[in-house]
Amino acid sequence: WNLLDSAGGAFGYWSVGFAFAYGGQVEGGPKTFIGNDNFFLSKDVDMEFWFFQYTFACALSSIVAGTIAERTKMMAYLCYSVFL
């Protein structure tokens, strides 16, 4: 389960998670509620910073995995993991 959490979490964080958290804030411009730029890491990104933040995102899904792992079906759990 934890390996699948990491793989699903990596895909979700790579595709939209990082952009939602850190995209779209221009210096001197208006602040946005949610990021709207850099989806799929389309711009130059500090990969060390990305990996550091990704580990926190995966830690969250691993905590949830311990509570619902045997109570849900595999496909529903994977969808939930990517969503987290």
Image: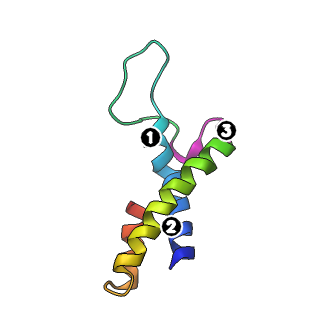
Q: Residue 21, which numbered label?
A: 1
**Residue 40 percent across, percent down from the top left:** 55, 47
C-alpha separation, residue under disc 2 versus residue under disc 1: 18 Å
- With respect to residue 74, does 5 lie above or below? above
Three-letter amino acid code at the position of disc 1: Ala
Circle 2 residue? 8
Q: Earlier in the sequence, mark 2 or mark 1?
A: 2
- With respect to residue 31, does 76 lie above or below? below
**Residue 56 percent across, percent down from the top left:** 51, 54
- With respect to residue 75, does 8 lie above or below? above
Circle 3 residue? 46
- The quadrant in which residue 36 appears is top left
Quarter of the C terminus within the rendering: bottom left
Q: Earlier in the sequence, mark 2 or mark 3?
A: 2
Q: Residue at x 53, y 75 (%)?
A: 2
Q: Residue at x 67, y 38 (%)?
A: 46
Q: Residue 69, which numbered label?
A: none
Three-letter amino acid code at the position of disc 2: Gly
The residue stretch that appears in magenta: 39-46
- With respect to residue 71, does 44 lie above or below? above
C-alpha separation, residue under disc 2 versus residue under disc 3: 21 Å
Total labels drawn: 3
Q: Secondary structure at mark 1?
A: helix
Q: Secondary structure at mark 3?
A: loop
Q: Main secondary structure of the magenta part?
A: loop
Three-letter amino acid code at the position of disc 3: Asp
Q: Residue at x 50, y 70 (%)?
A: 5
- The quadrant in which residue 60 appears is bottom left
Judge whether residue 56 is colored magenta: no
